[in-house]
Amino acid sequence: MSMLETKALTREFGGIIAVNRVDFNVERNMITGLIGPNGAGKTTLFNNITGLDVPSSGKVFFEGRDITGLPSNKVCRLGIARTFQNIRLFKDLSVIDNVMMGRHFHTGSLRNRTLQAVLSYFQVEKEECEEYEAAMKWLEFFGLENLRNDSAGSLPYGYQRELEIARALATEPKLLFLDEPAAGMNPQETDSLMETIRRIRDLGVTVVLIEHDMKLVMSICDNITVLNYGQKIAQGTPSVIQSDPAVIEAYLGTDDDEEDF
């Protein structure tokens, strides 16, 4: 059974079909790529899976459970985290505070609110220390620990990208969606990102990414799904995708362009 799958997922906006009956599968412990031209429906598919939008029809299943239409906070609690194409940090807060934001629903575990209110005075310091240590673990993973007290908005662009991923990982996800993580990065930053994504997968976190950098996609993805005009036109390994005539025509380009892969 796939870790995550959509069945005939469709999203329509006022007569425009952005995602058209897409069957999308994600296998556990793999890196899955989602590619296609601009406007192909990739981010819309992400949004409908992660609870930022609701499908017009179709289903989303995570570990065999129907999560169709669940709000994003509940999807996150189930173990699905994501980043965004446009960085969405709390730029006036410190680096460590941004990561600790990702830990918020791991605190206050007592269900009896009255008892929790009474004990909160005694718990708050202990919880604060635990969440700080958990957040520091992820900053150390990215080598950002020495910047923990800097404001997030003061970081170089590449570090901001890494910080957003660190905040997503702080939710302790089973499945991580990355929406164009290499956007705006230089070649050195992109190489570092590829290694980071592999390290995340090696931690046991399954990764799905939207990306236009084909060298990155073809280098690190185990499986790739291709969308065009909201429809899935291909799915397979990088070698299969690179040689698929429909993909070449829709996205990868002509024979002259293929020399880049």
Image: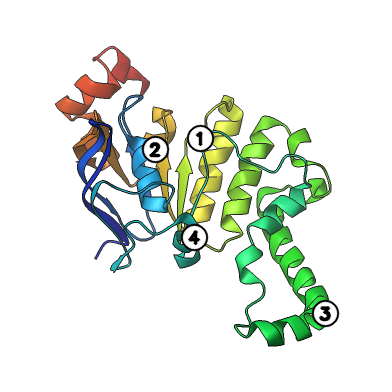
Q: Quadrant of residue 187?
A: top right
> Residue 129, relative to residue 231: is it above or below?
below
Please rate how many residues cluster around mark 2, counting C-alpha atoms within 10 Å: few if below 14, some from 14 to 19, many from 20: some
Q: CB atoms at circles 1 and 2 under 8 Å apart?
A: yes
Q: Which mark is residue 85?
A: 1
Q: Earlier in the sequence, mark 4 or mark 2?
A: 2
Q: CA gap, disc 3 to disc 2? A: 42 Å
Q: Secondary structure at mark 4?
A: helix
Question: Alpha carbon of mark 1 to alpha carbon of mark 2: how far?
Answer: 9 Å
Tag 3, which secondary structure? helix
Q: Which of the two discs, 1 and 3, labels the residue nearer the N terminus?
A: 1
Say which element carries label 2: helix
Q: Tell me which corner region of the image, top left, top right, bottom left or bottom right, holds residue 65.
A: bottom left
Observer-nearest of 126 and 11: 11
Identify the residue at image location x=70%, y=87%: 115
Q: Residue at x 84, y 48 (%)?
A: 149
Q: Amino acid at mark 3?
A: Tyr
Viewer-proximal residue, 241 or 150?
150
Mark 3 and mark 2 lie on one chain; the one further toward the N terminus is 2
Q: Residue tagged by mark 2?
A: 43
21 lies above or below 78:
above
Give the image location of residue 251, x and y in percent.
28, 23
Q: Which residue is mark 3?
A: 121
Tell me which amino acid carries mark 2.
Thr
Residue drawn at the location 26% of the way across and 46% of the way down: 56
In the rendered image, residue 19, in percent from the top left (x then y), is placed at 26, 38
The amino acid beneath tag 4 is Cys
